[in-house]
Image (spheres, rainbow, N blue to C red):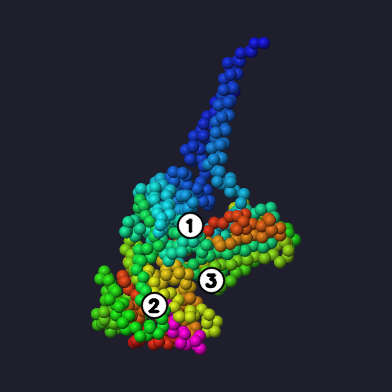
Amino acid sequence: MMKRIISLFLTLILLLSFTACSGNFAQVDLKEPIVLSEDGIVEKNVLDKIKNENAIATFTGKSGDIKYEWTIFGSDLADTRDVNLSLVLEETEKGIKVKFSETEDLGFPALLSIHLNERWKVDGATAFDGDTAVYSVSITGSKTSILNISVNKIVAECEILPDNEKAPESTPSTESSLNDKDDKNDTETNKTDDYLSDVKDNDDRVYSDGNATDQDKYKTDPVPEGKPMPVEPEDQEIDKKKSYTCTFSIECSTILNNLADLDPDKRELVPSNGVILAPTKVTFYEGESVFDVLQRVCKEKGIHLESSWTPIYNSAYIEGIHNLYEFDCGELSGWMYRVNGWYPNYGCSRYQLADGEVVEWRYTCDLGNDVGREGTW
Amino acid sequence: MSKRPMNPKTKKKLFIGIGAGVLLLLLILFLLFMNWDKIATGGTPTLTIETPQKISKSETEEFTLDVTISSFGDAIYPAASMSIAFDPSRLEFIGIEEGNVFIRNDEGEIPQKLPEWSCNPEQSNKSGKINIMYLDTTGGKNAFSKELLGTDDNVVLRLKFRLRGSVRSGDICDLIFDDAVFAASDETESLAMTTETLKVRNGKIVVGE
Protein backbone atom coordinates (compact mmCIF):
# COMPACT_ATOMS: atom_id res chain seq x y z
CA MET A 1 0.00 0.00 0.00
CA MET A 2 2.81 2.36 1.04
CA LYS A 3 4.68 1.56 -2.19
CA ARG A 4 1.66 2.53 -4.25
CA ILE A 5 1.24 5.84 -2.44
CA ILE A 6 4.92 6.67 -2.89
CA SER A 7 4.92 5.79 -6.58
CA LEU A 8 1.74 7.81 -7.12
CA PHE A 9 3.34 10.79 -5.32
CA LEU A 10 6.49 10.49 -7.42
CA THR A 11 4.52 10.27 -10.64
CA LEU A 12 2.56 13.36 -9.67
CA ILE A 13 5.73 15.33 -8.94
CA LEU A 14 7.34 14.19 -12.20
CA LEU A 15 4.24 15.19 -14.09
CA LEU A 16 4.17 18.60 -12.43
CA SER A 17 7.88 19.14 -13.15
CA PHE A 18 7.42 18.16 -16.77
CA THR A 19 4.45 20.46 -17.20
CA ALA A 20 6.25 23.34 -15.52
CA CYS A 21 9.34 22.87 -17.67
CA SER A 22 7.30 22.75 -20.85
CA GLY A 23 5.98 26.20 -20.02
CA ASN A 24 2.32 25.28 -19.89
CA PHE A 25 2.08 25.40 -16.14
CA ALA A 26 3.08 29.02 -15.87
CA GLN A 27 -0.28 30.67 -16.34
CA VAL A 28 0.12 33.68 -18.61
CA ASP A 29 -1.66 36.64 -17.08
CA LEU A 30 -2.43 38.80 -20.09
CA LYS A 31 -3.44 41.72 -17.91
CA GLU A 32 0.14 42.10 -16.74
CA PRO A 33 3.10 42.94 -18.98
CA ILE A 34 4.89 39.73 -19.87
CA VAL A 35 8.66 39.81 -19.60
CA LEU A 36 10.20 38.25 -22.69
CA SER A 37 12.36 35.23 -22.01
CA GLU A 38 16.03 35.42 -22.85
CA ASP A 39 15.53 33.86 -26.27
CA GLY A 40 12.60 36.22 -26.96
CA ILE A 41 10.33 33.44 -28.16
CA VAL A 42 6.61 33.90 -27.68
CA GLU A 43 4.99 30.54 -28.17
CA LYS A 44 2.05 29.87 -30.40
CA ASN A 45 -0.10 28.83 -27.44
CA VAL A 46 0.39 32.26 -25.84
CA LEU A 47 -0.61 34.02 -29.07
CA ASP A 48 -3.60 31.71 -29.33
CA LYS A 49 -4.62 32.69 -25.82
CA ILE A 50 -4.38 36.38 -26.77
CA LYS A 51 -6.46 35.71 -29.87
CA ASN A 52 -9.08 33.59 -28.11
CA GLU A 53 -9.52 36.07 -25.29
CA ASN A 54 -9.39 39.01 -27.71
CA ALA A 55 -6.90 40.45 -25.24
CA ILE A 56 -4.30 43.17 -25.51
CA ALA A 57 -0.97 41.78 -24.42
CA THR A 58 2.25 43.57 -23.69
CA PHE A 59 5.67 41.94 -23.89
CA THR A 60 8.61 43.79 -22.44
CA GLY A 61 12.29 43.37 -23.09
CA LYS A 62 15.55 45.18 -22.61
CA SER A 63 18.58 45.64 -24.79
CA GLY A 64 21.47 47.23 -22.96
CA ASP A 65 19.82 49.98 -20.97
CA ILE A 66 17.04 50.61 -23.50
CA LYS A 67 13.66 49.10 -22.71
CA TYR A 68 11.24 48.07 -25.40
CA GLU A 69 7.69 46.89 -25.40
CA TRP A 70 5.51 45.05 -27.88
CA THR A 71 1.75 45.50 -27.82
CA ILE A 72 -0.30 42.84 -29.57
CA PHE A 73 -4.04 43.01 -30.11
CA GLY A 74 -5.91 39.72 -30.13
CA SER A 75 -8.15 41.07 -32.86
CA ASP A 76 -5.12 41.31 -35.18
CA LEU A 77 -4.15 37.66 -34.83
CA ALA A 78 -5.22 35.06 -37.37
CA ASP A 79 -2.82 32.19 -38.02
CA THR A 80 -0.34 32.00 -35.20
CA ARG A 81 3.10 30.48 -34.78
CA ASP A 82 6.05 30.87 -32.44
CA VAL A 83 7.56 34.31 -32.94
CA ASN A 84 10.77 35.81 -31.67
CA LEU A 85 10.22 39.31 -30.32
CA SER A 86 13.67 39.98 -28.95
CA LEU A 87 15.58 42.95 -30.31
CA VAL A 88 19.10 44.26 -30.19
CA LEU A 89 19.07 48.04 -29.87
CA GLU A 90 22.18 50.02 -30.38
CA GLU A 91 22.68 53.74 -30.20
CA THR A 92 24.51 55.05 -33.24
CA GLU A 93 26.01 58.42 -33.98
CA LYS A 94 22.79 59.69 -35.55
CA GLY A 95 20.04 57.43 -34.26
CA ILE A 96 19.23 53.94 -33.10
CA LYS A 97 19.94 50.68 -34.83
CA VAL A 98 17.31 47.97 -34.41
CA LYS A 99 18.16 44.33 -35.09
CA PHE A 100 15.23 41.93 -35.10
CA SER A 101 15.78 38.35 -33.99
CA GLU A 102 12.71 37.24 -35.93
CA THR A 103 13.54 36.45 -39.52
CA GLU A 104 10.08 36.08 -41.03
CA ASP A 105 7.16 38.50 -41.16
CA LEU A 106 5.09 38.31 -38.00
CA GLY A 107 1.88 37.81 -39.94
CA PHE A 108 0.09 40.40 -37.82
CA PRO A 109 0.68 44.05 -37.01
CA ALA A 110 2.44 44.56 -33.69
CA LEU A 111 3.16 47.82 -32.01
CA LEU A 112 6.77 48.28 -30.95
CA SER A 113 7.55 51.01 -28.41
CA ILE A 114 11.16 51.83 -27.67
CA HIS A 115 11.62 53.71 -24.39
CA LEU A 116 14.65 55.94 -24.51
CA ASN A 117 16.23 57.04 -21.24
CA GLU A 118 16.27 60.66 -22.24
CA ARG A 119 14.38 62.99 -24.51
CA TRP A 120 15.39 62.69 -28.15
CA LYS A 121 15.04 66.21 -29.42
CA VAL A 122 14.26 65.55 -33.05
CA ASP A 123 11.43 66.72 -35.27
CA GLY A 124 10.42 63.23 -36.27
CA ALA A 125 12.05 59.99 -37.28
CA THR A 126 11.90 57.24 -39.87
CA ALA A 127 13.40 53.76 -39.81
CA PHE A 128 15.56 53.01 -42.83
CA ASP A 129 16.81 49.72 -44.18
CA GLY A 130 19.74 51.06 -46.16
CA ASP A 131 18.24 53.90 -48.18
CA THR A 132 14.70 52.56 -48.04
CA ALA A 133 12.27 53.94 -45.49
CA VAL A 134 10.65 50.91 -43.86
CA TYR A 135 8.76 52.22 -40.84
CA SER A 136 7.33 55.53 -39.84
CA VAL A 137 8.27 56.35 -36.26
CA SER A 138 6.11 58.53 -34.05
CA ILE A 139 7.79 60.10 -31.07
CA THR A 140 6.06 61.10 -27.84
CA GLY A 141 7.06 62.01 -24.31
CA SER A 142 8.19 65.24 -22.75
CA LYS A 143 10.77 64.01 -20.24
CA THR A 144 11.92 60.85 -21.99
CA SER A 145 11.01 59.80 -25.51
CA ILE A 146 8.94 56.85 -26.63
CA LEU A 147 9.39 55.77 -30.23
CA ASN A 148 6.32 53.98 -31.59
CA ILE A 149 6.53 51.80 -34.67
CA SER A 150 3.82 49.67 -36.20
CA VAL A 151 5.63 46.53 -37.33
CA ASN A 152 4.22 43.99 -39.70
CA LYS A 153 6.91 43.17 -42.17
CA ILE A 154 10.21 42.31 -40.56
CA VAL A 155 13.54 43.52 -41.85
CA ALA A 156 16.75 42.08 -40.49
CA GLU A 157 18.04 45.42 -39.39
CA CYS A 158 17.06 49.06 -39.64
CA GLU A 159 18.25 52.36 -38.33
CA ILE A 160 15.93 54.96 -36.87
CA LEU A 161 17.13 58.34 -38.03
CA PRO A 162 15.84 61.82 -37.34
CA ASP A 163 13.88 63.05 -40.32
CA ASN A 164 16.30 65.86 -41.01
CA GLU A 165 19.13 63.31 -41.39
CA LYS A 166 17.68 62.17 -44.68
CA ALA A 167 16.72 65.71 -45.66
CA PRO A 168 19.66 67.73 -44.44
CA GLU A 169 19.36 70.63 -46.81
CA SER A 170 18.39 73.82 -45.07
CA THR A 171 16.74 76.79 -46.69
CA PRO A 172 18.63 79.72 -45.25
CA SER A 173 17.55 82.17 -47.90
CA THR A 174 13.86 81.46 -47.41
CA GLU A 175 14.25 81.46 -43.66
CA SER A 176 15.96 84.80 -43.55
CA SER A 177 13.35 86.26 -45.85
CA LEU A 178 10.56 85.23 -43.51
CA ASN A 179 12.42 86.44 -40.48
CA ASP A 180 13.00 89.76 -42.06
CA LYS A 181 9.67 91.40 -42.60
CA ASP A 182 10.97 94.30 -44.71
CA ASP A 183 12.72 92.03 -47.16
CA LYS A 184 9.75 89.72 -47.41
CA ASN A 185 7.42 92.08 -49.22
CA ASP A 186 10.14 93.14 -51.66
CA THR A 187 10.94 89.59 -52.67
CA GLU A 188 7.41 88.21 -52.78
CA THR A 189 7.27 87.74 -56.54
CA ASN A 190 10.73 86.27 -56.95
CA LYS A 191 10.14 83.89 -54.08
CA THR A 192 7.06 82.48 -55.77
CA ASP A 193 9.03 81.76 -58.91
CA ASP A 194 11.74 80.02 -56.92
CA TYR A 195 9.14 77.83 -55.31
CA LEU A 196 7.70 76.75 -58.61
CA SER A 197 11.10 75.84 -59.95
CA ASP A 198 11.66 73.64 -56.90
CA VAL A 199 8.87 71.22 -57.73
CA LYS A 200 10.25 67.86 -58.79
CA ASP A 201 9.21 65.90 -61.87
CA ASN A 202 8.05 62.81 -59.95
CA ASP A 203 4.60 64.29 -59.44
CA ASP A 204 1.73 62.10 -60.69
CA ARG A 205 -1.14 64.32 -59.58
CA VAL A 206 -3.96 65.35 -61.84
CA TYR A 207 -3.78 68.99 -62.91
CA SER A 208 -6.64 71.23 -63.84
CA ASP A 209 -7.09 71.97 -67.54
CA GLY A 210 -9.04 75.11 -66.60
CA ASN A 211 -12.17 74.02 -68.50
CA ALA A 212 -14.42 73.25 -65.53
CA THR A 213 -17.17 75.76 -64.89
CA ASP A 214 -19.09 74.32 -61.93
CA GLN A 215 -18.31 73.63 -58.33
CA ASP A 216 -17.49 70.05 -57.39
CA LYS A 217 -19.57 68.15 -54.83
CA TYR A 218 -17.55 69.66 -52.01
CA LYS A 219 -18.34 73.24 -53.00
CA THR A 220 -14.97 73.81 -54.60
CA ASP A 221 -14.90 76.37 -57.39
CA PRO A 222 -13.11 75.39 -60.63
CA VAL A 223 -9.41 74.96 -59.99
CA PRO A 224 -7.25 77.33 -62.04
CA GLU A 225 -5.48 75.84 -65.03
CA GLY A 226 -2.20 74.16 -64.22
CA LYS A 227 -2.93 73.75 -60.54
CA PRO A 228 -3.28 70.33 -58.87
CA MET A 229 -6.83 69.04 -58.57
CA PRO A 230 -8.07 68.20 -55.08
CA VAL A 231 -8.05 64.59 -53.92
CA GLU A 232 -10.37 62.97 -51.40
CA PRO A 233 -8.65 62.06 -48.13
CA GLU A 234 -10.57 58.79 -47.78
CA ASP A 235 -9.24 57.61 -51.16
CA GLN A 236 -5.63 58.32 -50.45
CA GLU A 237 -3.28 55.49 -49.66
CA ILE A 238 -0.15 56.51 -47.88
CA ASP A 239 2.94 54.66 -48.98
CA LYS A 240 5.44 54.97 -46.19
CA LYS A 241 8.13 53.38 -48.28
CA LYS A 242 8.25 56.46 -50.47
CA SER A 243 9.33 59.54 -48.62
CA TYR A 244 9.92 63.04 -49.96
CA THR A 245 10.61 66.42 -48.51
CA CYS A 246 8.81 69.71 -48.53
CA THR A 247 9.29 73.00 -46.75
CA PHE A 248 6.87 74.12 -44.08
CA SER A 249 6.51 77.43 -42.32
CA ILE A 250 3.93 79.08 -40.06
CA GLU A 251 3.73 82.81 -39.54
CA CYS A 252 1.35 85.47 -38.31
CA SER A 253 3.20 88.69 -39.13
CA THR A 254 -0.01 90.32 -40.37
CA ILE A 255 -1.16 90.56 -36.77
CA LEU A 256 1.74 92.93 -36.07
CA ASN A 257 0.05 95.44 -38.38
CA ASN A 258 -3.33 94.93 -36.76
CA LEU A 259 -2.55 94.79 -33.07
CA ALA A 260 -5.47 97.07 -32.25
CA ASP A 261 -7.86 94.34 -33.45
CA LEU A 262 -6.12 91.57 -31.56
CA ASP A 263 -7.77 89.94 -28.57
CA PRO A 264 -5.72 91.44 -25.69
CA ASP A 265 -5.37 88.00 -24.07
CA LYS A 266 -3.55 86.79 -27.17
CA ARG A 267 -1.03 89.61 -27.37
CA GLU A 268 1.74 87.71 -25.64
CA LEU A 269 1.36 84.77 -28.02
CA VAL A 270 2.44 86.75 -31.07
CA PRO A 271 6.19 86.39 -31.74
CA SER A 272 8.00 89.69 -32.17
CA ASN A 273 8.79 88.88 -35.82
CA GLY A 274 5.55 87.01 -36.43
CA VAL A 275 7.34 83.74 -37.17
CA ILE A 276 5.94 80.70 -35.37
CA LEU A 277 7.85 78.17 -37.43
CA ALA A 278 10.65 79.32 -39.69
CA PRO A 279 10.86 77.48 -43.04
CA THR A 280 11.77 73.92 -42.19
CA LYS A 281 12.50 71.00 -44.44
CA VAL A 282 10.25 68.10 -43.45
CA THR A 283 9.82 64.56 -44.67
CA PHE A 284 6.47 63.28 -45.84
CA TYR A 285 5.19 60.11 -47.44
CA GLU A 286 3.57 59.54 -50.77
CA GLY A 287 -0.15 60.23 -50.55
CA GLU A 288 -0.01 62.58 -47.58
CA SER A 289 -1.87 65.87 -47.59
CA VAL A 290 -0.90 69.31 -46.37
CA PHE A 291 -3.03 68.65 -43.29
CA ASP A 292 -1.25 65.36 -42.50
CA VAL A 293 2.10 67.08 -42.57
CA LEU A 294 0.88 70.13 -40.65
CA GLN A 295 -0.30 67.86 -37.86
CA ARG A 296 2.99 66.01 -37.72
CA VAL A 297 5.07 69.16 -37.83
CA CYS A 298 3.04 70.81 -35.06
CA LYS A 299 3.24 67.73 -32.91
CA GLU A 300 6.96 67.34 -33.37
CA LYS A 301 7.66 71.02 -32.80
CA GLY A 302 5.30 71.24 -29.84
CA ILE A 303 3.13 73.82 -31.58
CA HIS A 304 -0.51 73.91 -30.56
CA LEU A 305 -2.94 73.01 -33.35
CA GLU A 306 -6.69 72.76 -33.30
CA SER A 307 -8.76 71.62 -36.21
CA SER A 308 -12.23 70.35 -36.92
CA TRP A 309 -13.59 68.17 -39.66
CA THR A 310 -15.86 69.91 -42.14
CA PRO A 311 -17.88 67.28 -44.00
CA ILE A 312 -19.30 69.77 -46.48
CA TYR A 313 -15.77 70.53 -47.72
CA ASN A 314 -14.48 67.01 -46.97
CA SER A 315 -11.51 68.53 -45.26
CA ALA A 316 -10.12 69.51 -41.91
CA TYR A 317 -10.50 73.15 -41.05
CA ILE A 318 -7.71 74.81 -39.08
CA GLU A 319 -9.25 76.67 -36.19
CA GLY A 320 -6.12 77.66 -34.33
CA ILE A 321 -2.36 77.36 -34.42
CA HIS A 322 -0.13 78.43 -31.54
CA ASN A 323 -3.35 79.27 -29.68
CA LEU A 324 -4.12 81.97 -32.25
CA TYR A 325 -7.60 81.23 -33.51
CA GLU A 326 -9.81 82.49 -36.28
CA PHE A 327 -11.45 85.82 -35.37
CA ASP A 328 -8.79 86.53 -32.72
CA CYS A 329 -7.70 89.52 -34.79
CA GLY A 330 -10.92 90.77 -36.25
CA GLU A 331 -13.88 89.12 -37.92
CA LEU A 332 -11.98 88.55 -41.17
CA SER A 333 -9.05 86.80 -39.51
CA GLY A 334 -8.01 83.16 -39.65
CA TRP A 335 -5.47 80.72 -41.02
CA MET A 336 -4.74 80.15 -44.71
CA TYR A 337 -2.25 77.97 -46.52
CA ARG A 338 -0.25 78.62 -49.62
CA VAL A 339 1.63 76.07 -51.69
CA ASN A 340 4.33 77.23 -54.11
CA GLY A 341 2.92 80.72 -53.94
CA TRP A 342 -0.70 79.71 -54.68
CA TYR A 343 -3.58 79.68 -52.21
CA PRO A 344 -5.52 76.50 -53.05
CA ASN A 345 -9.27 77.02 -53.23
CA TYR A 346 -9.93 73.76 -51.35
CA GLY A 347 -9.24 72.40 -47.88
CA CYS A 348 -5.81 71.32 -46.72
CA SER A 349 -6.88 67.66 -46.34
CA ARG A 350 -7.53 67.60 -50.11
CA TYR A 351 -4.17 68.98 -51.18
CA GLN A 352 -1.85 66.08 -51.90
CA LEU A 353 1.75 67.13 -51.51
CA ALA A 354 4.46 66.59 -54.09
CA ASP A 355 8.19 66.49 -53.60
CA GLY A 356 9.91 69.82 -53.07
CA GLU A 357 6.79 71.90 -52.53
CA VAL A 358 6.82 74.89 -50.23
CA VAL A 359 3.91 75.18 -47.84
CA GLU A 360 3.24 78.34 -45.87
CA TRP A 361 0.62 78.69 -43.19
CA ARG A 362 -0.20 82.36 -42.81
CA TYR A 363 -2.53 84.20 -40.54
CA THR A 364 -4.70 86.69 -42.37
CA CYS A 365 -6.52 89.61 -40.77
CA ASP A 366 -8.36 90.50 -43.97
CA LEU A 367 -9.70 87.33 -45.58
CA GLY A 368 -6.42 86.77 -47.41
CA ASN A 369 -6.09 90.22 -48.98
CA ASP A 370 -3.23 91.09 -46.66
CA VAL A 371 -1.22 87.95 -47.45
CA GLY A 372 -1.27 88.20 -51.20
CA ARG A 373 -4.27 86.05 -51.97
CA GLU A 374 -6.08 86.94 -55.18
CA GLY A 375 -9.47 85.94 -56.49
CA THR A 376 -12.38 84.38 -54.70
CA TRP A 377 -12.85 81.09 -52.87
CA MET B 1 30.71 -0.98 18.46
CA SER B 2 29.81 -2.20 14.99
CA LYS B 3 27.22 -0.34 12.89
CA ARG B 4 24.02 -2.26 12.26
CA PRO B 5 23.39 -2.65 8.47
CA MET B 6 20.29 -0.87 7.23
CA ASN B 7 17.32 -2.95 6.26
CA PRO B 8 17.21 -2.95 2.38
CA LYS B 9 13.52 -1.98 2.49
CA THR B 10 14.23 1.00 4.75
CA LYS B 11 17.14 1.97 2.47
CA LYS B 12 14.87 1.93 -0.58
CA LYS B 13 12.25 4.04 1.17
CA LEU B 14 14.95 6.50 2.18
CA PHE B 15 16.21 6.85 -1.40
CA ILE B 16 12.70 7.30 -2.69
CA GLY B 17 12.00 9.90 0.01
CA ILE B 18 15.20 11.84 -0.77
CA GLY B 19 14.49 11.66 -4.52
CA ALA B 20 10.95 12.96 -4.04
CA GLY B 21 12.19 15.75 -1.77
CA VAL B 22 14.82 16.85 -4.30
CA LEU B 23 12.26 16.86 -7.12
CA LEU B 24 9.83 18.87 -5.00
CA LEU B 25 12.54 21.36 -4.13
CA LEU B 26 13.53 21.71 -7.79
CA LEU B 27 9.91 22.27 -8.72
CA ILE B 28 9.49 24.99 -6.08
CA LEU B 29 12.72 26.70 -7.20
CA PHE B 30 11.61 26.55 -10.81
CA LEU B 31 8.24 28.10 -10.08
CA LEU B 32 9.88 30.81 -7.99
CA PHE B 33 12.26 31.55 -10.86
CA MET B 34 9.43 31.68 -13.40
CA ASN B 35 7.43 34.14 -11.32
CA TRP B 36 10.28 36.13 -9.81
CA ASP B 37 9.37 39.37 -11.53
CA LYS B 38 5.84 39.22 -10.21
CA ILE B 39 7.02 38.33 -6.71
CA ALA B 40 9.67 41.07 -6.69
CA THR B 41 7.29 43.82 -7.79
CA GLY B 42 4.13 42.43 -6.27
CA GLY B 43 4.32 44.70 -3.26
CA THR B 44 4.47 48.04 -5.05
CA PRO B 45 1.10 49.54 -5.96
CA THR B 46 0.81 50.15 -9.69
CA LEU B 47 -1.35 52.78 -11.37
CA THR B 48 -2.20 51.75 -14.92
CA ILE B 49 -3.88 53.44 -17.86
CA GLU B 50 -5.46 50.44 -19.51
CA THR B 51 -4.88 50.34 -23.25
CA PRO B 52 -8.27 49.87 -24.94
CA GLN B 53 -9.05 47.89 -28.06
CA LYS B 54 -8.27 49.75 -31.28
CA ILE B 55 -10.57 52.69 -31.87
CA SER B 56 -11.92 52.98 -35.38
CA LYS B 57 -10.88 56.19 -37.12
CA SER B 58 -14.51 56.75 -38.05
CA GLU B 59 -15.57 56.51 -34.42
CA THR B 60 -17.32 59.72 -33.53
CA GLU B 61 -18.61 58.68 -30.13
CA GLU B 62 -16.76 59.23 -26.88
CA PHE B 63 -14.82 56.35 -25.40
CA THR B 64 -13.24 55.77 -22.02
CA LEU B 65 -9.96 54.40 -20.71
CA ASP B 66 -9.79 52.86 -17.25
CA VAL B 67 -7.16 54.02 -14.81
CA THR B 68 -6.66 51.15 -12.38
CA ILE B 69 -4.70 50.65 -9.17
CA SER B 70 -3.31 47.27 -8.16
CA SER B 71 -3.13 47.85 -4.40
CA PHE B 72 -2.62 50.43 -1.68
CA GLY B 73 -0.24 50.51 1.25
CA ASP B 74 -1.36 50.29 4.88
CA ALA B 75 -1.99 54.04 5.25
CA ILE B 76 -5.12 56.00 4.37
CA TYR B 77 -4.81 58.44 1.48
CA PRO B 78 -6.90 61.60 1.78
CA ALA B 79 -5.51 63.22 -1.38
CA ALA B 80 -4.54 62.02 -4.82
CA SER B 81 -3.40 63.65 -8.01
CA MET B 82 -2.14 62.61 -11.39
CA SER B 83 -0.89 64.37 -14.46
CA ILE B 84 -1.26 62.66 -17.80
CA ALA B 85 0.20 63.93 -21.07
CA PHE B 86 -1.64 63.33 -24.35
CA ASP B 87 -1.68 64.65 -27.90
CA PRO B 88 -4.51 67.22 -28.13
CA SER B 89 -4.15 67.43 -31.90
CA ARG B 90 -5.43 63.85 -32.19
CA LEU B 91 -7.51 63.43 -29.05
CA GLU B 92 -10.10 65.59 -27.41
CA PHE B 93 -10.29 65.08 -23.67
CA ILE B 94 -13.94 65.22 -22.62
CA GLY B 95 -13.68 64.63 -18.90
CA ILE B 96 -13.72 61.99 -16.19
CA GLU B 97 -16.18 59.25 -15.37
CA GLU B 98 -16.27 57.61 -11.99
CA GLY B 99 -14.58 54.28 -11.38
CA ASN B 100 -15.29 51.63 -8.77
CA VAL B 101 -12.70 52.38 -6.10
CA PHE B 102 -14.53 53.81 -3.11
CA ILE B 103 -13.48 56.21 -0.43
CA ARG B 104 -14.52 55.94 3.20
CA ASN B 105 -17.76 57.60 4.11
CA ASP B 106 -17.92 60.32 6.72
CA GLU B 107 -18.00 57.79 9.51
CA GLY B 108 -15.18 55.79 7.97
CA GLU B 109 -17.49 52.82 7.64
CA ILE B 110 -19.13 50.72 5.00
CA PRO B 111 -20.99 51.54 2.74
CA GLN B 112 -18.57 53.89 1.10
CA LYS B 113 -18.94 56.52 -1.57
CA LEU B 114 -17.11 57.36 -4.77
CA PRO B 115 -14.57 60.20 -4.87
CA GLU B 116 -15.24 63.41 -6.75
CA TRP B 117 -12.25 63.99 -8.97
CA SER B 118 -11.67 67.41 -10.43
CA CYS B 119 -10.05 68.42 -13.69
CA ASN B 120 -10.35 71.11 -16.37
CA PRO B 121 -10.93 69.59 -19.83
CA GLU B 122 -10.72 72.94 -21.62
CA GLN B 123 -7.32 73.69 -20.16
CA SER B 124 -6.21 70.09 -20.72
CA ASN B 125 -7.01 70.32 -24.42
CA LYS B 126 -4.98 73.50 -24.69
CA SER B 127 -1.95 72.25 -22.81
CA GLY B 128 -2.00 68.55 -23.73
CA LYS B 129 -1.83 67.64 -20.07
CA ILE B 130 -4.66 66.31 -17.91
CA ASN B 131 -4.27 67.35 -14.30
CA ILE B 132 -6.62 65.41 -12.04
CA MET B 133 -7.02 65.86 -8.34
CA TYR B 134 -8.96 64.50 -5.41
CA LEU B 135 -8.83 66.18 -2.02
CA ASP B 136 -10.61 64.93 1.08
CA THR B 137 -11.47 68.09 2.94
CA THR B 138 -12.72 66.22 5.99
CA GLY B 139 -9.21 65.38 7.18
CA GLY B 140 -9.25 61.69 6.40
CA LYS B 141 -12.87 60.66 6.78
CA ASN B 142 -13.24 60.41 3.00
CA ALA B 143 -9.89 58.84 2.26
CA PHE B 144 -8.79 55.97 0.03
CA SER B 145 -7.67 52.87 1.86
CA LYS B 146 -6.78 49.33 0.92
CA GLU B 147 -9.73 47.63 2.60
CA LEU B 148 -12.01 49.37 0.14
CA LEU B 149 -10.33 47.77 -2.87
CA GLY B 150 -12.10 44.97 -4.63
CA THR B 151 -10.45 41.75 -5.69
CA ASP B 152 -10.87 42.33 -9.40
CA ASP B 153 -10.18 45.41 -11.51
CA ASN B 154 -9.91 48.44 -9.29
CA VAL B 155 -10.82 51.35 -11.51
CA VAL B 156 -9.84 54.61 -9.85
CA LEU B 157 -11.42 56.70 -12.61
CA ARG B 158 -12.13 56.64 -16.32
CA LEU B 159 -10.71 59.09 -18.84
CA LYS B 160 -13.19 60.07 -21.51
CA PHE B 161 -11.90 61.02 -24.96
CA ARG B 162 -13.07 61.54 -28.51
CA LEU B 163 -10.90 61.15 -31.60
CA ARG B 164 -10.36 64.31 -33.57
CA GLY B 165 -11.25 64.25 -37.25
CA SER B 166 -7.58 64.50 -38.10
CA VAL B 167 -6.61 60.99 -36.97
CA ARG B 168 -5.53 58.38 -39.46
CA SER B 169 -5.66 54.63 -39.30
CA GLY B 170 -2.47 53.42 -37.61
CA ASP B 171 -1.98 56.53 -35.50
CA ILE B 172 -0.72 55.82 -32.00
CA CYS B 173 -1.58 58.20 -29.19
CA ASP B 174 0.38 57.67 -25.99
CA LEU B 175 -1.08 58.59 -22.63
CA ILE B 176 1.87 59.17 -20.37
CA PHE B 177 1.93 59.69 -16.63
CA ASP B 178 4.02 62.76 -15.88
CA ASP B 179 3.25 62.49 -12.20
CA ALA B 180 1.03 60.53 -9.83
CA VAL B 181 0.62 60.66 -6.06
CA PHE B 182 -1.63 59.12 -3.44
CA ALA B 183 -0.80 61.27 -0.45
CA ALA B 184 -1.00 59.96 3.12
CA SER B 185 -1.15 62.23 6.14
CA ASP B 186 2.29 60.94 7.05
CA GLU B 187 4.36 61.90 4.05
CA THR B 188 6.68 58.92 4.40
CA GLU B 189 3.72 56.65 3.73
CA SER B 190 2.58 58.45 0.58
CA LEU B 191 2.63 56.60 -2.71
CA ALA B 192 4.43 58.68 -5.31
CA MET B 193 5.77 58.07 -8.77
CA THR B 194 8.83 60.23 -8.05
CA THR B 195 9.89 58.16 -5.05
CA GLU B 196 9.04 54.91 -6.86
CA THR B 197 6.60 53.95 -4.12
CA LEU B 198 3.99 54.03 -6.86
CA LYS B 199 4.67 52.36 -10.18
CA VAL B 200 2.89 53.57 -13.29
CA ARG B 201 2.04 51.99 -16.59
CA ASN B 202 1.21 54.26 -19.49
CA GLY B 203 -1.54 53.53 -21.97
CA LYS B 204 -1.95 53.86 -25.72
CA ILE B 205 -4.78 54.53 -28.07
CA VAL B 206 -4.26 52.83 -31.39
CA VAL B 207 -6.44 54.05 -34.25
CA GLY B 208 -7.82 51.26 -36.40
CA GLU B 209 -9.57 51.20 -39.76
Of all residues, the one furthest to the top in this rendering is B1
Q: Which residue is found at the position 46% from the left and 44% from the top?
A: A38
Q: Which mark is nearer the camera, 3 or 2?
A: 2
For the residues beneath circles 3 and 2, the answer to whether they share a chain is no
Asked whether residue A133 is drawn in magenta, I would say no
For the residues beneath circles 2 and 1, the answer to whether they share a chain is yes
The chain carrying label 3 is B
Q: List the residue tagged with mark 3.
A: B127
Q: CA distance from mark 3 to mark 1?
A: 23 Å
Q: CA distance from mark 2 to mark 1?
A: 35 Å
Q: Place residue B109 in its image quadrant.
A: bottom right
Q: CA distance from mark 3 to mark 2?
A: 30 Å
Q: Characterize the local packing of mark 2: few (<14), some (14-19) or many (20 or more) Cα atoms within 10 angstroms.
A: some
Indicate the position of residue B81 as horizontal and vertical percent values: 62, 63
Above or below: residue A262 compared with residue B109: below
Indicate the position of residue B11 as horizontal and vertical percent values: 58, 19
Q: Which residue is found at the position 55% from the left and 61% from the top?
A: B177
Q: Which residue is found at the position 48% from the left and 70% from the top?
A: A302
Residue A53 showing in the rendered view? no
The chain carrying label 2 is A
Q: Characterize the local packing of mark 1: few (<14), some (14-19) or many (20 or more) Cα atoms within 10 angstroms.
A: some
Circle 3: element type: helix
Left or right: where does residue A200 sit relative to residue B188? left
Circle 2: element type: helix
The chain carrying label 1 is A
Q: List the residue tagged with mark 1.
A: A116
Numbered range of the magenta stretch: A249-262
Task: Judge by depth and name the residue closer to the eye, A254 or A224.
Answer: A254
Q: List the residue tagged with mark 2.
A: A176
